[in-house]
């Protein structure tokens, strides 16, 4: 029965009787039932699984989802056996998880036996398969490394953004403070040029303190404009230069004409 199954399976149909006998001697027939997990993604691919009967779904998982790669339903379809093409120290694992969709049977061949038999039957073929497999593994490893570097770069950029935003805000605050200090010093120089007396300076400072202690007035846009007009008229009546530029500043500081 097993010989007939392997002779009709497309993977092993080209083997000679001697090769088929050696293959059967190296492996074993394994029955499975619906819902069984035959092999698991990432575990060492110690066996080649050749489907003889039934259906097996190949499922692969990622961080956020699980998806179906393929469904094995044709006798001769296979999975695993990857350690046959790598050195003994390699941890070549199954690329997917095999889940039984129906009852069925597989023929399992240990990977080391598979490598030995293929090396004896087709030395050139084994070298070719090994070379292709190692190349594919190298490309896959490089792709994973690139994905990791991209993810790291994205994380670093996000971290730099989070760090730079507060830093930029601090720099802007320092620059604004510097400009305010320059304006204050310039105003003091202007007062000095006007030959302001000590009594007048004390009075001005008292007015500043009174304004700083006042609660902010928020009586609407129209009322604010009226207050600016009143302050502007008051300043203009006293021949204050730039009265209409100063009026909004006094109004925003909760000043009035009294």
Image (cartoon, grey):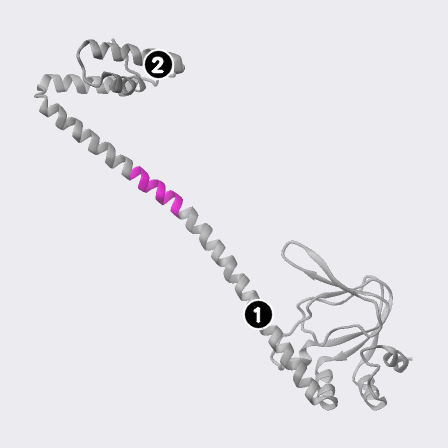
Pick the front one: 194 or 199: 194
Give residue 44's position: percent from left, percent from top. 67, 73
Q: Tag 1: Cα neighbours inside 10 Å, few (<14), some, or many (≥20)? A: few
Image point (86%, 63%), residue name:
102
Q: CA distance from mark 2 to mark 1?
A: 70 Å
Give residue 90's position: percent from left, percent from top. 61, 77
Query: Would you name the residue on which mark 1 appears?
Result: 141
Image point (84%, 70%), residue name:
74
- Residue 219 appears in view: no
Instruction: Write down the quadrant of residue 238 in the picture.
Output: top left
Quadrant location of the N terminus? bottom right
Q: Secondary structure at mark 1?
A: helix
| Most common secondary structure along the magenta stretch | helix
Q: Secondary structure at mark 2?
A: helix
Q: Identify the mark at residue 164; answer none if there is no mark.
A: none
Q: Is residue 47 left or right of residue 5?
A: left
- Looking at this view, name the residue that lies furthest to the right: 1
Image point (18%, 20%), residue name:
205
Q: Identify the mark at residue 225; answer none if there is no mark.
A: 2
Q: Which residues are magenta?
A: 164-174
Quadrant location of the C terminus? top left
Residue 166 in magenta stretch: yes
């Amino acid at each position: 029965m097993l010989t007939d199954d392997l002779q009709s399976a497309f993977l092993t149909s080209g083997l000679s009787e001697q090769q088929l006998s050696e293959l059967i001697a190296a492996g074993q027939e394994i029955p499975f039932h619906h819902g069984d997990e035959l092999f698991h993604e990432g575990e060492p691919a110690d066996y080649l699984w050749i489907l003889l009967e039934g259906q097996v779904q190949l499922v692969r998982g990622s961080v956020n989802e699980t998806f179906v790669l393929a469904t094995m339903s044709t006798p001769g379809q296979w999975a695993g056996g990857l350690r046959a093409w790598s050195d003994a120290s390699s941890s070549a694992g199954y690329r997917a998880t095999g889940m039984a969709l129906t009852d069925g049977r597989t023929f399992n061949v240990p990977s080391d036996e598979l490598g030995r038999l293929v090396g004896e039957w087709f030395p050139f073929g084994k070298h070719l398969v090994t070379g292709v497999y190692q190349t594919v593994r190298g490309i896959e490893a490089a792709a994973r490394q690139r994905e990791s570097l991209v993810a790291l770069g994205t994380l670093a950029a996000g971290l730099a953004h989070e760090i730079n935003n507060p830093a930029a805000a601090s720099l802007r605050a320092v620059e604004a403070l510097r400009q305010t200090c320059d304006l204050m010093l310039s105003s003091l120089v202007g007062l000095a040029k006007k030959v302001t007396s000590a009594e007048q300076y004390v009075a001005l400072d008292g007015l500043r303190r009174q304004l700083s202690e006042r609660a902010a007035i928020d009586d609407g846009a129209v009322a604010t404009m009226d207050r600016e007009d009143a302050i502007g008229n008051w300043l203009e009546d006293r021949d204050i230069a730039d009265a209409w530029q100063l009026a909004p500043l006094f109004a925003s500081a909760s000043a009035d004409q009294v």
